[in-house]
Image (cartoon, grey):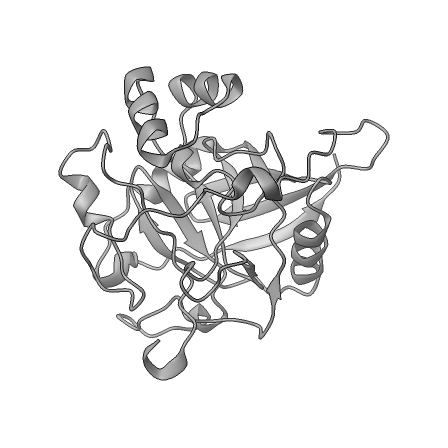
């Protein structure tokens, strides 16, 4: 990778996107530049072997919540106990105030909003962002049932070609907006991916919406439970090069009790 910089990218499965011509806009290569569609599909062939298969939402465990404040409104997200490595890392950074003043530096309407790059703090207008790291990665925690529905809080990561274990960024995350998908398009996507969607996925993506092609390929470690409209507002902002909002969208994150 040029300059050996780490670029935390989300790769898009665009062959059957309901946005039509919008799909090609969302193709990125490892350099962060617009690329071709030829190698854009994330590899999910081994996803079933990496599921943790733990029971979801044990009632006897404490639940953790974070408040994400922005100029477009606030979001409340629950962190999943089923992904303890990601949960604990996120809580640690939040308590240290790491995210306060950072930007949602990469925003793509009908897909996701991404932030957490330490280089985005006090970044100059037009400065390229997305390479920032804290110098470590987090092992993937793919849990059956934790999927990319609208509002999912998930970890960004480097591409499969340099990160075959799909380990997560130490700090960069994204929040899913996505689309509502017709059942026939989901079935076509499933065929092209070589992996069937289960009943839960079909129900969620045909009603609530999300980004189904990322399931079990990027770690989902939380869910926005309040402020889904804020995701839509941020996703709709005007963006420039590398999908960075023209007007900075800053965040502040804190732990809250519910």
Q: Farthest right residue?
A: 60
Residue at the far left in the pictured view: 21
Residue at x 53%, y 46% (from the top left corner): 154
Q: Would you say 86 lies left or right of 188 here?
A: right
Residue at 36% x, 68% y is: 129
Q: Position of residue 206 (x, y in %)?
A: 38, 18
The answer to whether residue 153 is seen in the rendering is yes
* Vertical position of residue 95 compared to residue 215: above or below: below
Q: Left of 32 or right of it: where is 69?
A: right
Q: Give me the residue at 30% from left, 73% from top.
A: 127
Q: Please, is residue 59 above or below residue 142 in the view?
A: above
Foreground of the two, 23 or 98: 23
For the residue pair 186 and 230, the one nearer the viewer reads as 186
Q: Quadrant of the N terminus?
A: bottom left
Q: Position of residue 180 (x, y in %)?
A: 34, 23
Residue at image location 43% in from the left, 41% down from the top = 214
144 above or below 46? above
Within the image, what quadrant is residue 65 found in? Answer: top right
Q: Position of residue 223 (x, y in %)?
A: 57, 36
Q: Quadrant of the C terminus?
A: top right
Residue 217 locus on image (x, y percent): 49, 45
């Amino acid at each position: 990778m040029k300059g050996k910089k780490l670029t935390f990218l989300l790769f898009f499965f665009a062959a059957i996107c309901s946005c039509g011509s919008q799909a090609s806009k969302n193709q990125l290569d490892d350099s962060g530049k617009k690329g071709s569609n030829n190698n854009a599909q994330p590899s999910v062939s081994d996803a079933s072997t990496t599921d943790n298969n733990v029971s979801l939402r044990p009632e006897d465990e404490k639940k953790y919540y974070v408040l994400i404040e922005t100029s477009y409104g606030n979001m409340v997200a629950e962190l999943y106990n089923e992904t303890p490595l990601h949960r604990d890392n996120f809580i640690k950074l939040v308590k240290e105030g790491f995210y306060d003043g950072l930007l949602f530096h990469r925003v793509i309407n009908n897909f996701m909003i991404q932030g957490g790059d330490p280089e985005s703090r006090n970044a100059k207008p037009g400065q390229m962002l997305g390479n920032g790291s804290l110098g470590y990665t987090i092992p993937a925690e793919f849990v059956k049932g934790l999927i990319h529905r609208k509002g999912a809080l998930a970890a960004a990561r480097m591409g499969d070609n340099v990160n075959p274990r799909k380990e997560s960024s130490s700090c960069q995350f994204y929040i899913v907006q996505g689309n509502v998908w017709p059942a026939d398009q989901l079935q076509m996507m499933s065929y092209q991916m070589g992996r069937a969607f289960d009943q839960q996925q079909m129900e969620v993506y045909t009603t609530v919406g999300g980004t189904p092609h990322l399931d079990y390929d990027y770690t989902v470690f939380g869910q926005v439970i309040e402020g889904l409209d804020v995701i839509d507002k941020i996703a709709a902002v005007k963006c420039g090069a590398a999908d960075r909002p023209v007007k900075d969208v800053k965040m502040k994150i804190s732990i809250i009790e519910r």
